[in-house]
Amino acid sequence: MASEQRKLGLVAVIALVTGESIALGIFLTPAAMAKSLGSPLLLGLVWLGMALMAMSGALCYSELAIRHPQSGGEFVYLRAGYGEQIAFLYGWMSSLVMYPGVAAALAVGSVAYVAQVLPLGSRALAVVPAFLLCAFAIVNILGTRLSGAVMSSVNILKLGVLFSLVGWAVVSGHAHVSNLFPLAERRPGSDALFPALAGGAVSAFFSFGGWWEAGKIAGEIRDPKRNLPLAYVGGVSLVTAVYLLVSAAFLSVLPIDKLTSNTAFVAQFGEALFGATGARVLSICVLICVCGGMAALSMAAPRVFYAMAQAGSFFPAFGKLSPRFGTPANAILLQTGLALAVLLLGAFDRVLAYIIFSAVLFLALTASTLFRTREPVRGWWFPLTPIIFIACCLVIAGLILMHDPLPAFVGVIIVLCGIPARKFLTTRQSAHLVHERS
């Protein structure tokens, strides 16, 4: 986007980094991981291991964002590093398949908690996911400054709520450090060590996931060479602190042996902290986290369509800005329409199962473009950091493949379907140009 469109500051970019990383999973993942791992120390080590991976990736993405300070994120980086074909396959996978699935999953995930807060009937609850998707689309169409302000406000509120929960657990006397001990000893009923560690690593990756999305709005960020690196590193640090502190608060209030299931955990924790109104209070907290994630996703995801169209890899209409609002309105409408379609089909869970393996491989491939730059990377962290990040991505992909190979292979086939799709689009674009010239 043009320089006059750079309306987002550092706070908004940090909000985007933390917004997508801290969503519904903050209340479900730590409990499930703790029950499986059976040890507070192991849980902390898994979070720290994922923080190392995320920080390594943040340094890689900071360098890429500095070199390519325009909207589109991975599409732009892969295009520079590997050419049009690989970049298109990423755009095909992420914008047409993955992001609509993620958006629909977040919207559907909110329904159970809306039901706890508002006295709505089943018909009204059924339209809540579509309402949320459309509401965030409208906010994003109305202006980058407005959508940035909404996203920042919701995600700052979210961080405030989460830190307040930790503080209240301590101040109210409900948290007992003794519940964390013995730190290293695994509790009865925990899973076998290797499957528990493998499952914990994958769950932690999904929980941290999304910090890389800030590069997708690089063209709308003021002073991107300064603000993007600060946002990546600062955002990942904040996410790490939140997961460690919240996990410690959860386990100091509810010992591992008292945990039942993921879904029941929110009610258990809420009742322990706030009594009879606990389920409603925690439901409000969950909804704030979900809305923060949706606000960040609805801002970042359409910028891939926009970048693809700008590069001539997608229909030109989606590479245009609204003359009134200065936002990629067509790209936002397309992204929202796809999310609504996934929602209507009820296919978001299958979409995510199919595509996540390929998505992890694209993360590794994106970081590897640092080894293909014309001007060498001169950071103190190079080349160790991208090697760590790529290795971690490959381990996560391998664990996903070992756990359930069929969806991974289906996902690869979906990605490869982008090859004929690109040929069709390229032929169509060429015919359109010939027609215009004649």
Image (spheres, rainbow, N blue to C red):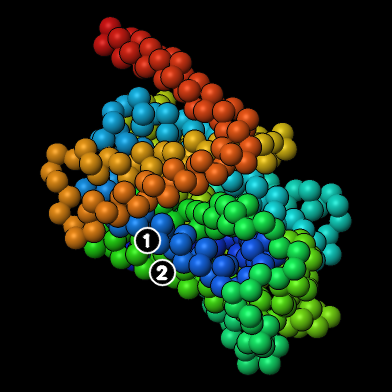
Position above or below: 283 against 131: below
Q: Residue furthest left?
A: 375
Position above or below: 141 against 90: below
Mark number, residue 237: 2
Q: Secondary structure at mark 1?
A: helix
Task: Give the x, y percent position of residue 392.
Answer: 42, 50
Task: Give the x, y percent position of residue 51.
Answer: 44, 63
Q: Residue furthest right?
A: 121
Q: Secondary structure at mark 2?
A: helix
Q: Is residue 46 left or right of residue 428?
A: right
The amino acid sitting under disc 2 is Ser
Would you call the spot at circle 2 few (<14 residues within 10 Å), some (14-19), or many (20 or more)? some
Task: Give the x, y percent position of residue 190.
Answer: 71, 63
Front residue of this view, candidates 164 and 217:
164
Q: Which residue is mark 1?
A: 55
Q: Are marks 1 and 2 in contact (CB under 8 Å)?
A: yes
Front residue of this view, candidates 282 and 408:
408
Q: Is residue 313 left or right of residue 373?
A: right
